[in-house]
Image: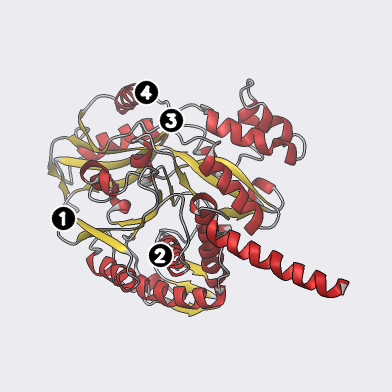
Amino acid sequence: MQHRFKSILGAVVVALLALAGSSFGQTAPQIDWNKVNSEALDYFRTYLRFDTTNPPSNTAAAIAYLKSILDKEGIATETFESKPGMVTLVARIPGPADVKPLLLMSHADVVPAVGANWTHKPFSADIADGYVWARGSIDNKAHGIMALMTILALKRNHVELKRGVEMMVNPDEEAGGENGATWMVKNHWDAIDPAFAFNEGGEGAPDWLGLKGITFTVAVSEKRVNWLHVTVRGKGGHGSVPKPDNPNLILINALHRLLEKQPPIRITKIFADAMESIAPLEPSPASFQLAHLDQPDVAEAAMTGVLSPYEIQALMRDTISLTMLNSGVKVNVVPTVAEAGLDCRLLPGTDAGAFMKRLRDLLGPGDFTIDYIQRPDDAPPSPTSGEAWDAIKRVVASDFKDARVVPWMTTGGTDSRVIRDKGVPAYGFVPVILGEGEISRIHGDDERLSVDNLNRGIKATYDLTIDLCAAQK
């Protein structure tokens, strides 16, 4: 009798819990991740086969493909065309009207690839050795598929939302975004208007700066793009007669003065906070150095040891890189004009006017013209506390064993800056783990992403969205 009573009571409790789940909220639905991953891999490979090289950043066909998948599921979509072929997609699952949504951002355009240098053709999306090989596989089409599968899973599982979810896939990021995210913010902000956004710019790295385990460097800011075109004019003539007014000579000497010494070290608060957070995990003397970078000569000492990687040192100063040279039409003709392209990146807080004055002074005398290709912005950093940041930390802790989160700043520019410039927190967080061998392939030959990384990224993106947007977990 007692056993029968307990059985009945247990059945009643189960029924009440089920009723409560349907009446007062919901638990996260059980998802067949093997099925999701198989579907996503097909979408990913097809998406990669669209040649969206920038220039010309023609994303129309790729966007139409993504839109067709969403349309079949009855998910609301809109497209926006800034220039012929430059198409942006916005898809959304709405939440309460008085709560701003979460935005999952990615870009569809990719940088050029020289196919002859690749093991697999850049737009074939071949699978080999557990990887998908293609231009854009990391930068940045995988992140778009992670957002796509998250949107699909929310819709299919009828997840009740306390906050809406939207994804935006845009063109032109690789050329500065003027006809992509920047254009959307200027002309169609009402189509997104999020509470916060997640974008490219940060991922997990094994043994980062010598630390054991996985460190996720989540971008809360980025160096400010300051692209310049330098032109110098001289006197042309016959190549057999060397003269000091040769514009090539003037330009070479000027660039030598400019590049001989990079701007001085300046430790930003973002960098100092990140280094201080990992200092206790480092051995001596690195532990002391990282915790005291503001003291005289400590940063210089660290740069010979724990902070020796060039990509780290680029975050400790404004930088100037010579990336383009153009001059001359024939070997025996001295040209009248010589040109250079400079990729300058400014730290947050750098006075752009003072930087330009220093640059002009170092170029020295000569008939120089300096034109902006892209001017630096003044977007504020995103906060390292609050709802979105805390959700990132929870998901990393639950989905990646023994991983840590560090607030970070990127050396390269992303579309996040135009979101931050609107006062909206944007975080560079792609939940994959990339070793140096994979990072070096971005914008290089043989770009690839492991299938395992794609799978873990899809689940973590979904988990992050559930954490922030589901009515009840």
Mark 3 or 1: the one toward you: 1
| Secondary structure at numbered mark 2 | helix
| Secondary structure at numbered mark 4 | loop
Q: Which residue is mark 1?
A: 83
* Residue 258, horizontal then vertical, whole percent: 37, 31
Q: Which residue is mark 2?
A: 148
Above/below status of 394 relative to 160:
above
The three-letter code of the residue at mark 3 reads Pro
Q: How many neighbours does mark 1 have within 10 angstroms: few (below 14), some (14-19), or many (20 or more)?
A: few
Is 422 on the left or on the right of 301, as rendered?
left
Q: Which residue is mark 3?
A: 348
Query: Which residue is at 35% across, 23% downward?
Result: 358
Q: Which residue is mark 4?
A: 351
| Secondary structure at numbered mark 3 | loop
Q: How many neighbours does mark 4 have within 10 angstroms: few (below 14), some (14-19), or many (20 or more)?
A: few
The answer, for residue 81, to whether it is visible in the render is yes
The three-letter code of the residue at mark 2 reads Leu
